[in-house]
Image (cartoon, rainbow, N blue to C red):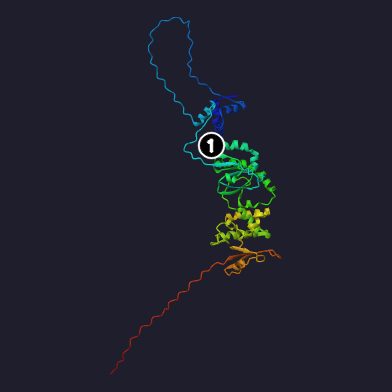
Amino acid sequence: MEITEQQFLENMDTLPDQEQSMVIGLIDANTPEALEAFASSLGVTFSVEDVADETIEEPVDTEMEPTLLLEEPVVEEAPIEETPVPVESPMDQQMQQLALGDQVVEPVPEEAVPIDAVAGPIMQEGASETGVADDVPMDAEEGAYVVNAAAIERVGVRDFEERILKPNIESLRKKGVEISLEQLKSPAAQVEGDTDVAVSNGEYYLPPVLVKEIGLDLLEKINKRGEQETEERISEEEAPVEPMQQQVQALKRGERVKKKTRDEEIARTIVAEAGVFKTKEAMQKVLNVMVNRTKAYKFTDNKGKEVKTLQDNLDEIEFSGYKSQKNKKLDKNQLNIARELVKLSRQDKLKDLTDGATNFWNPNTATSTWFKDNIANNKDFELTATDKLSNTVYQHDYYKRKPVVAPLPPEKPKPVVTAPLPPEKPAIESTSIR
């Protein structure tokens, strides 16, 4: 099948802007010979309608009868108006160059300032190949996107790069933004960011500038192709969570990188801290203590650091569960409940079951006398709640500092009011009547 330049341009006009950009990117990246060979493999041949400026000479009839040569009147020819040349758009110019067999090259704007960014598949040597292990730490840029490994496997790395990434990378390059496609064999060294995350081999990292160019909606559609398989792989993972994974934000299902809050560590800590009580209320009380510390006036931990955020509570001395949860496989149901409690606390919707407690302990198992001397037996603190398992040593007593009641100011002495003395009556002079 043969198509003309005009047909090619008309077909291009019917495409959406994004697809037009993809076609232009394809033109830029290949030689005319490669493009012609590719078109031929599809059974299509490009042709250009030649516009010839040759003058067509009329044949001279040599057998014409002789005629008298009469002097013809001179007729002034009207001036020929020149037809204005239409100004072609950059898109039309590129399409015409393609039809003529030229390679379209659009210069990068001189004033453009390149932004170095890296995109690529996670391929760290020695890491798990399950695609959900989250055993590869890196510092990601806020707003970056990690596509799950299952989705990449379904789409295919090469297809994902050729159809989605490279046209958009080329579009950014024309805007002065340089994106490097690399195999991220050492993500921690290759990517510079300010958010600690844990990723897995097989996942695909995209920097924020490329995410914006591609579009978040498209990336989420691609990512959804692998969500079900990702969940299945996660459920099959039976190994205990490694300590390293507690120090970073895990991205298992493919999502945008956000500022870390360490909420997963907080949830795991309150599960471990509630211990054998195994109830929502016990976990909620532990979280209440964490929240109340952030609200108390200049509450400081054992190092003298003021507790301002929930994650400031993550200390092995303040909460022993923070240490024990690191190498411990926790009950999934309890962990899900704890996650919901943390979410409620973030929304300021968590009910306080401790009446403002900022400290708790087990009086039956505590090995240090510090709590007893400074909290339990301190007249400035009061007991607000207790959890206890009957016939066991397991007990949690919750304390808060008593509100400080300012002494009333001494009463001012009331002024003594004395009634005025009545005026003295004038003395009556006695007279003798004679």
Residue 415 in which image quadrant? bottom left
Where does the image place residue 136, in percent across and percent down from the top left? 62, 47
Q: Provide residue 80's location: percent of width, then percent of height.
A: 41, 20
Front-most of residues 70 and 256: 256
Above or below residue 320? Residue 43 is: above
Outermost residue toward the right in this view: 391
Q: Residue placed farthest to the left in the image?
A: 434
The image quadrant where one finds the C terminus is bottom left
Front-most of residues 230 and 314: 314
Where residue 53 sits in the image (x, y, percent)? Answer: 48, 19
The reply to whether residue 225 is in sight is no
The amino acid beneath tag 1 is Ser
Quadrant of residue 342 in the image?
A: bottom right
Q: What residue is shown with label 1?
A: 171
* 10 Å crowding of disc 1: few (<14), some (14-19), many (20+): many
Image quadrant in which the N terminus is located = top right
Q: In this view, does 66 lie to the left or right of 120?
A: left
Query: Relative to residue 19, is residue 283 depicted above or below?
Result: below
Q: State whether residue 294 is above or below residue 16.
A: below
- Give the percent coordinates (x, y) of residue 318: 61, 60
Please state which of residues 409 and 232 is positioned toward the viewer in this rendering. 232
Give me the residue at 50% from left, 31% from top.
Answer: 90
Q: Residue furthest bottom?
A: 434
Q: Which of 303 and 250 is in front in this view?
A: 303
